[in-house]
Amino acid sequence: MLFTSRLLPPRRFALLLAAASLLTAGGCAGRPELPILEQTGSRTAAQTASRLEALLPADVLLVGEQHDAPAHHELEQQIISSLATRGLLAAVALEMAEVGASTAQLKPSSTDEQARRALKWDDKAWPWTAYGPAVMTAVRAGVPVLGANLPRAQMPASMNDSKLDAQLPGPALKAQQQGIRIGHCNLLPESQIQPMTRIQIAKDITMADTVHQLLLPGKTVVLLAGNGHVDRRLGVPQHLRADVTAKALQLRAGDASGTDGADAFDSVWATPALPDTDYCAGLKAQLPSTAK
């Protein structure tokens, strides 16, 4: 067993562990590398670990983020680090990569570029600078990171799959449809609402199926996704097996007092508010022909 020396700063200790694992791999062919556990001694990391306790034990921790909130990405890295250092992290599943992409074959000493290639990362859609720290914390701990999202090639078929309409209770389906309208600033033609809702449902089902494949007794699978995907009433939790203990955590930029109902999430962690951004103006510029 490895013990952290009180005389070494955490980052220095992580570097020594990395060097030791490389020497071990080079000297003993065929042996797996030791995990590189990144100890973080910051006050915020300690606070995150403490708050995490209230959500455990859980087979699955569904972490919902606002994609452009830097504080959310920092919290996600801290959550993964806390679980990994305690030996409780089973795997990390990502909305940000498609099903079939995986770091399972990588070694703890693998580079960011190797991880990006393994996950077939789309940096234009999901900046690696935002998500790389969380991903690499898991990779260095020897924990697999897997894509969990519906492949783009399957989206056209999902749009036309009427069976997906029956995958949510009637009120939830209508709420999901309304969410699509509002989420697209009421710029989508009504004829696109049903197909776009089906894609959302298909994504949630795909993420749930991925999580099911990663379950390990006594450990926790972490899913990183947008807040809408982890909503208990509408998202991934609707498609998880009844025997799976899942906790939904919403990371919210700004005041947490305006949550969407106590039944939507098990916990809400507030982070600093972001500068006001007119997202609808940007969407309108992309979809000029659909603007009303």
Image: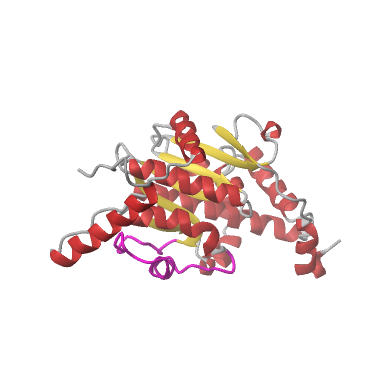
Please check the rendered image and state whether residue 161 is part of the magenta-colored stretch, yes or no.
no
- Residue 215: where, in percent of width, then height? 34, 44
Which residue occupies the foreground of this view, 58 or 108? 108
The image quadrant where one finds the N terminus is: top left
- Residue 187: where, in percent of width, then height? 79, 59
The answer to whether residue 266 is visible is yes
Please check the rendered image and state whether residue 116 is part of the magenta-colored stretch, yes or no.
yes
Side of 159 relative to 209 (left or right): right
Colour mode? secondary structure
Q: In the picture shown, does residue 126 fall above or below 270?
A: below
Q: Residue at x 41, y 51 (%)?
A: 92
Side of 38 relative to 235 (left or right): left
Q: Residue at x 46, y 31 (%)?
A: 50
Which residue occupies the foreground of this view, 7 or 24? 7
Which quarter of the figure has residue 289?
bottom right
- Residue 56: where, in percent of width, then height? 42, 32
Which quarter of the figure has residue 168?
top right
Provide the major secondary structure of the magenta segment. loop
State which region is magenta. 99-125
The image quadrant where one finds the C terminus is: bottom right
Question: As drawn, which residue projects farthest toward the right?
Answer: 292
- Residue 111: where, in percent of width, then height? 37, 66
Q: In the picture shown, does residue 205 fall above or below 126?
A: above
Which residue occupies the foreground of this view, 19 or 167? 19
Q: Residue at x 28, y 42 (%)?
A: 5
Question: As drawn, which residue projects farthest toward the left?
Answer: 28
Side of 251 relative to 2 (left or right): right
Total marks shown come to 0
The answer to whether residue 265 is visible is no
Question: As drawn, which residue projects farthest toward the front?
Answer: 7
Which residue occupies the foreground of this view, 149 or 226? 226
Side of 26 relative to 125 (left or right): left
